[in-house]
Every structure is written in structure tokens, then in C-alpha cells.
Image (cartoon, helix red, strand yellow):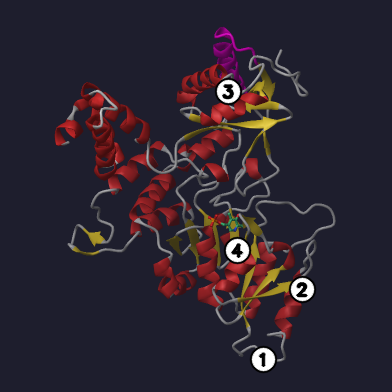
Amino acid sequence: MDALLTDPSVSHHASRLGRPRALEVVREVQRQARQGALPAAEVVTVVATRLAGLAGSPGPRPVLNATGVVVHTNLGRAPLSEAARAALADASGYADVELDLATGRRGRRGGSVVDALLRAVPEAEDALVVNNGAAGLLLATTALAAGRQVLVSRGELVEIGDGFRLPDLIESGGARLREVGTTNRTHLADYEHALAQGSGDGTTGTARSSIAALLKVHPSNFRVAGFTASVPVADLAMVAHRAGLPLVVDTGSGLLESDPMLTGEPDARTTLRDGAGLVTASADKLLGGPQAGLILGDVDLVARLRRHPMARALRVDKLTLAALEATLRDPAAAPVTVARRASAHELRARADALHRALVDHGLPCEVVEHDGRVGGGGAPEVPLPGWAIALPEGLAAPLRLGDPAVLARVHDGRCLVDPRCVPPAQDDVLAGAVLAAAGRAGDVGVKDAGHVPPTGGHPAP
Ligand SMILES: *Cc1c(COP(=O)(O)O)cnc(C)c1O
């Protein structure tokens, strides 16, 4: 058995699959050979083939994102930059996570990430990194307001996806929400009125049930249009300051500074400059880093959060610290930023090249205008002008099942392959995957794989 596992045609697959599982496969094949179901001479080949079939990458499989949706929730949100991937690998062994190599003493965990965050957001006095955006909000409201009330606008009680709702999350930590205003309109006077009322149950402001903080949540995945009103951070900060209470702002997308392409999307620097005490955000949306929650702001407030017992349960591991710091060193290199800023001109050239490669191999298709989206809970309505290849709808399934898997966008009876979020170095791989899918389309019952229905949009000249 050992000789079998060290055979060059077997060992690579066996080590990828793991020894215990590989041994099971070897035993099963040997049993078949002993029973005469398999010639002894074929055992090595059969073992190698079975192991190869089982030894794909463990965990989530890589997918080429051809949807044009930059922060795609179902595809793991932000892909990491080259530098962040390298940092992950470097940190994956023993690393000086809580050791100061200069003195040999215990070091500050995540200290260099906090330094990088404070360089990127000079308006923040201190920062803390937790497991994700939801954890940041939970920790902030629990540490500042457990057993007391948090004032929040009715229009900001958001469901963030997969059935999870921010109000439930916040109340699970012990803070109670005190809603003000209405779904579509909330005014400064609504907050002032609630503060003047105190706890709202007749007890005075010093009671346990009194208001402990003001919260503003950015409605990142929807827009309320029409007759609407909400209170800007600067005005809310003034009211909070007058009441001697902290203002926590959940900005959601993790934009650190304002971006002219994303007007209306709040950023950490402006929000803190406008007077927020704490900003919470995700690191794997518009910032383009690993899954993490960022908490930035007032030094005393951050200290209260850092000392709360829950902080220990929400802390991030060394891999996240490494990838986040690498992302912060060069935010413009984050793949989400590159994909979001890709010009329509550049995307047209890539779509044309892909089109040529497919037509040259006998697959008729066309180049069509296609707007990408930021997606994933940020700037939901901002179109990102670009181009895609239009293919028959029936190709979407074989593309998903191919190797590499490709996720295209199915829209209006067509399968649209948008190069925006595919790394340009993978364009050849993408063309190969489309051709392979078209070749396989017959096997999965797709008729007319070569026929493209007429376009409703703007065909390329
Ligand atoms: C995305 C989002 C969250 C949740 O963040 P996660 O990183 O997914 O936990 C919370 N609040 C807002 C406003 C968001 O946009």
C-alpha cells in the first residue's frame, strides 16, 4: 500500500486528497483486484484516476466572475490583490502576531493593521478590526448601549441579506432600538423630541433604560425614492454632541475616502470629519480586502469596544490581519477597485478580442453594450458602462459546470459574458472555457448552441 501511495502517478493526488481518504480508495481498488474484478496490472492506473477525480481544491472552488457585478455576494465578495494573497501565504506559518521581535516581549495584536488604518483615515484617533461589518455594529451597540436605548431612524432598519436584519442583530447584544421618524422621512426634530422625552417610559435620563447612543445606518442595498428626508451626519452629530451621547454610523461599504464615481456613497473620512464618534464598515466590499469589520473613531469609544468581552469572540485571525494590511497599503490595486474603474473603451477592446477568438473557432456571438454594477451592498444604482459577449442562454449552465467554472449573467434570454471582473490575464482561459462549454452544450441538452437570439440592445457595429 505504501509503495502504491508513493508511486509518482499517485502521490501528488494522494497528498492533495489527504492520506486517510487516499488509503480508503487504495483499499477499495485492491479489494476489487483480489476479487478478480480488476487485473492487478491496472491497480496503479485506476487508483491514480480515482484519486485525481476526488482531489480537486478543498473548500470553495475558484470561479471566473463574468457577470459584471464587482462585489458579488455569492462569489465571496472581494477577490484579494496579488499583494494580499502573498501576505496571506507569508502569515500562514508561525508569525509575530503577538510578539515584538525587537524586545522579545508580548506585542500588540494587529498593531500594524491599526497603524495602516489610521494612515488611511487620519480623522480617526483609533481603530479596531473585527470579524465582519455585522460584528462591528454588534460590538459598538453592545459595548455602548447594552441594557439601554439606541436612537435610530425607522427608514434605516435594514435587512442585509439571507434573512438577517440589523435590528435583530443589535438587539441580540442587549441594546434596545428606539425608532424615530417614518419609513420615508425622518427629521432632526424627531431625534430631538426623543432625546427630550428621555427613556420614553417616564423614567429620567439617568435610568438604565435611558438613551445611550445615536445610530445612523447607510441603506446600502436599496434606495428610497420620492418624498424622502433623512438627517445628514453633521446635523445628527451636533444633536448627539449636545446630548453628550456618541453617534455611531454604519457606512456599510468600507469606502475610506470619498470617490467622485460613487457620489452618495458615504466614506469613513467624511463621516468622521462630520462628527461621528464611531464609523463601522465592511472590509470586503468597496475597500476590496478580506472579510473583516472596521471600527474607526474616537479613542475612548474604541477603547470601550476593545475592552468589552465580546471583542475577544469577534476578533480576526492572522490571515485576515495580513491580507487587510496588504490591501490598505495599496487600495487602488484591489481587484474590486480595478474592475469598478475599468473604462468602457478598455472593456470594449477585451470584448472584441474575446469575440474574435470565439468566432475564429466557429462560435457565432456578438458584442453588446452591458452595464456592470458595483453590487454587494454599495452604490446599488450606479451603472458601470461596459461591454459583454452575448451567447445563447443555454450556455450558462455548461459554463458554470466547466473547469474553471464561469458565472455569466442570464438576461433577456441570453447568456452575457462580461470581462469587467475577469482578470485580463485570464481572458484566454475565459475564451477556452466558453468554447469548451459550447462543445459540451450538446451533452447537457442545449439545442442551437451556435444560435444567438436577436439583441434588444445595441449591437456592436
Ligand atoms: C454589508 C453591510 C452590513 C453587514 O456587513 P458584513 O460585513 O456583511 O457583516 C451591515 N451594514 C451595512 C450598512 C452594510 O452595507
Identify the element where label 3 is drawn: helix
Checking the image for residue 249, the label placed there is 4
Mark 2 vs mark 3, CA separation in Å? 49 Å
The location of residue 346, given as percent across then percent down, is 58, 23
The mark that comes first in sequence, 1 or 2, is 2
Mark 4 falls on what kind of element? strand
Q: In this view, does 230 lie above or below 425?
A: below
Residue position for label 2:
190
Side (left or right) of 118 relative to 267: left
Amino acid on which disc 4 is placed: Val
Is residue 197 among what the camera can see? yes
Q: Position of residue 50 (x, y in %)?
A: 33, 31
In 3D space, how far apart are the residues under numbered discs 4 and 3 (Cα atoms)? Answer: 37 Å
Q: Residue furthest right?
A: 227
Q: Earlier in the sequence, mark 4 or mark 3?
A: 4
Label 2 secondary element: helix
User: Residue 364 in the image: x percent, y percent?
Assistant: 64, 12
Say if mark 4 contacts mark 2, CB within 8 Å: no
On the image, numbered disc 3 is attached to which residue? 346
Judging by the rendered image, the residue that carries numbered circle 1 is 204
